[in-house]
Amino acid sequence: MKKPLNNEIRKPTKTISGITPVAVMLPPRRCNHGMCTFCPSFNVPQSYTPKSPVVLRASELNYDAFKQVQARIKAFELMNHPTQKIELIIMGGTFLEYDKDFQYKFIKDCYDALNDKISKNLEESQKLNETSKHRCVALCVETRPDVCINFIDRMREFGVTRVELGVQAIDDKIYEITKRGHKVKEVIESTKALKNAGFKVGYHLMPGLPGSNLKKDLILFKKIFNDQRFRPDQLKIYPCEVLKNSQLEQDYLNGKYIPYNKEEIQNLLIRMLKIVPRYCRVMRIMREIPPEYIVAGTTKIDLRKDVENLLRKNKQKIKEIRFREIGFNQEEQNQSNLNESSLRLKITKYKASDGKEYFLEIVNKKDVLLGLLRLRIFIGDNKKQAYVRELHVYGKSLNLDEENLKFLKNSAQHQGLGKLLIKEAEKITIKNKINKLKIISGVGVRKYYEELGYHLEESYMVKNF
């Protein structure tokens, strides 16, 4: 890799949302339920291909979690990215189906790598990470709806803050055709259980699956947001592609399945993005699959860029979070648009999974997003409970040692927006006659909440009123 110039950040969008993502790949292992028809069969982590970039990086290190984390941090540092606020993302299969001892060791190895020190146990490693140079501010696990509901307490012990569910399509007939191994019922149950434990919830969706069509995909997509039993906080949209070494490849070759073409996918994505409400973030569109493994379907990995350029060109009103983030709206990134008088607090209330959600945003006059907070209020253990499920301030990621500057030009971070959002969440909690607010927190953010009067209680940061 060519060394970047002084002050040049290579691939700046990697950290433009305020954190530095570090993906850690699990070693190959088949899912307990068997194989989905769309999933390829290679001697690599489930659903991936041998030449997927993240697989290549991981396999060279023998899928060692410690080495993967340290290698990614070094790569980000070489590209001049800040590496003090890390989001760990565990990829490559249904992590919670791996052996229990393996899970604990894998997570501990990740923390040890961030700390650059081997600890005696997970608890010690997490405690050290609270003040280490590379802090875990968020931890994501990818899993199945029918698996995660049994491991909520364990995920909190690990320090998980976000769970991505392989939902694909909320339709039992499609699940049966694709041999998914669970039903919509499990999606509903796991979504509610995760939200009630304070997690941020993401769905992986796959339009174009066997048993669906363009019209049905759009109907199911609308249902995800119209039906309060779903309403995820974020999405990854991966249009179905025919991959080598999958059952779907045989179905395609036998004329039993035809994938969408590029134009059909693009038009569908445009219609979908127009539907996404302001409380949801579309994390990714299209999977990074090398074209040589794609038998049929579009090979255009950066289709999202084309779709968003069309939407901006046509001045379409898109409410989805990523489209509105300050980091992806370059013309807004100047001091005049970040001054206090141009900002306002917007609160969106909606029902989800039998609870009440308050979505708090700091936006400017053009609805460009600088910070957000998710507050959930629900009945649990026969009483009202309140959880902050996410606090995020957008803008390019900054190192923690830069926080002493009162105002940082071209950045929404470290302007006190996070503290303002927390105060508003506390007001709403008290107004609802609840005497305790719990915050799901990455291990590396605990000290931040301690400064705001919170204390650690059973893996949550808590304040009593």
Image (cartoon, rainbow, N blue to C red):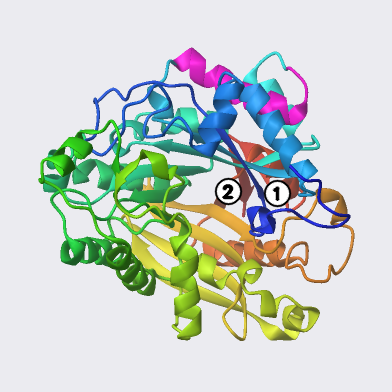
Q: Earlier in the sequence, mark 1 or mark 2?
A: 2
Image quadrant where residue 349 sits: bottom left
Residue at the spot 83% in from the left edge and 71% down from the top edge: 409
Which one is in front, 110 or 217? Answer: 217
Q: Main secondary structure of the magenta part?
A: helix
Q: CA distance from mark 1 to mark 2?
A: 9 Å
- Left or right: residue 338 versus residue 270 is right
Instruction: Provide the residue designation for mark 1.
Output: 449
The amino acid type, in three-letter code, at marker 1 is Tyr
Q: Secondary structure at mark 2?
A: strand
- Left or right: residue 403 versus residue 397 is right
Mark 2 packing: few (<14 Cα in 10 Å), some, or many (20+)? many
How far from the left and from the top, in percent, is residue 7? Answer: 86, 57
Up-down relation of residue 244 to residue 406 (above or below): above
Up-down relation of residue 157 to residue 310 (above or below): above
Report how many numbered discs are placed on residues in the image: 2
Instruction: Assess whether mark 2 and mark 1 are in contact (beta carbons under 8 angstroms).
Output: yes
How far from the left and from the top, in percent, is residue 278? Answer: 45, 71
How far from the left and from the top, in percent, is residue 274? Answer: 37, 74
The amino acid type, in three-letter code, at marker 2 is Ile
Image quadrant where residue 131 sits: top right
How far from the left and from the top, in percent, is residue 261? Answer: 27, 60
Residue range corresponding to the magenta coloring:
100-118
